[in-house]
Image: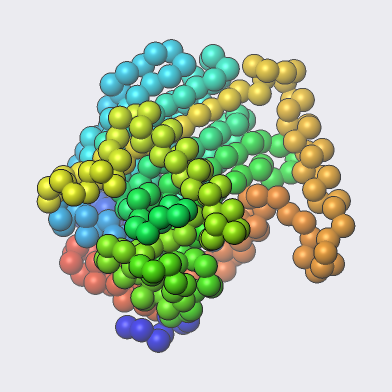
Amino acid sequence: MRGNGATATDVPVGQVREQILLVLQAWGMAEDLARTTADLMAGTDLLGIDSHGISMLPAYEEKWRAGSLRLDARARIVRDGGASALIDGMGGLGYPVAAQAMHLAVDKALEHGVGAVSVCNSHHFGAAGIYARIAVERGVVGLVTSSANGVIMVPTRGAMPMLGTNPIAFGAPAAYNEPFLLDMATTTVAANKVKVYDFLDKPLPRGWAVDGQGGAVTDAAAAMQFIFTRPEGGLTPLGGTAAMSSHKGYGLAMMAQILGGTLSGSAFAARRAPTRRPGEPDDVGHFFLALNPDAFRAAGSFESDMDDMIDAMHDTPPANPDEPVLVAGEPEAAERERRLRQGIPIPAALAERLRGICERAGTPYLLDRP
């Protein structure tokens, strides 16, 4: 139902987590894997990243019913070389294998100073930043990249989409400040953020999406068609236009594709799409790098210098006194505290779709106002 997206119900995070868990288990996911997934998805919503939390369930249901997503899959390590490893996701949803890979990379970094783990044959894993958070919570620096199944980014000077949103996340721990946590799509905006604007019935800012002639698309529903249905048009690389240095976003997307996909031997979606058969898995690849600061310098000195640098950013005179200078991760940390108190907003349009998912799965709907 369109036109009611501005209305939202605030739901406690525990109910959101339980709703995700019930649906995933009804679809056949093992309880331990479903709990990991539900924790990560609800945690993403808690940070205010509505595009990658419970709103992903409709897309996952579609893939599961089409047979391209194996929710009964359990990942396995196929290569282990000391400081490096490769994990096969076995065609399952990306959250459990991504969490396993990041923890394994951290384990290796704590032992060897550096840990690098690639994942092949996976699916969508949510927001990349949630895995960088695993690294910083364990006291190390983390880098995460991923390939993507969707072909939705139009490269600079191109006329057709050739890449996905191909995210990059980076985290570094501090001592008393919030950790530095960068989480970004290499497109000007993530496709799932356009989905949120569609749920809310809001127009898109110019420069996020383009049609087949490179013209700006501001209607969210029309943009969804160009991104997910029509062969032409799509999202712009970070920067938006060549004049605004979109070649940099294009280059970052290629870097994320190389590390996340090529290194692990996963599919390059633009080449695979024409020959992909119905029911075949997405074969998305991920990459996780962990660096132990204590392997490079005296224990605690890295975190101390991080605090000094973050403090210097905070001390920057603001252009607007009401808007102080922040560093990556701080807006999400503030939103997390707010949502812990007030709940996670579920727009009416999303709630309608989630009710349908629950009915089809035979599970109760838990997201009404408590």
Of residues 72 and 156, the one nearer the viewer is 156
Give the answer, above or below, for where 254 lies relative to 249: above
Q: Which quarter of the rendering shows the C terminus?
A: bottom left
Q: Residue at x 39, y 13 (%)?
A: 81
Give the answer, above or below, for where 283 lies relative to 233: above
Its colouring scheme is: rainbow
Name the residue at the bottom extreme.
Answer: 3
Q: In this view, does 225 lie to the left or right of 235?
A: left
Residue 148 drawn at (x, y percent)? 35, 47
Residue 282 drawn at (x, y percent)? 25, 45
Q: Which residue is drawn at 69% across and 45% down?
A: 178
Of residues 280 and 1, the one nearer the viewer is 280
Residue 223 drawn at (x, y percent)? 38, 71
Give the answer, above or below, for where 234 lies relative to 333: below
Of residues 359 and 54, the one nearer the viewer is 54
Q: Residue at x 36, y 75 (%)?
A: 222
Residue 189 drawn at (x, y percent)? 50, 60
Quadrant of residue 361 in the image?
bottom left
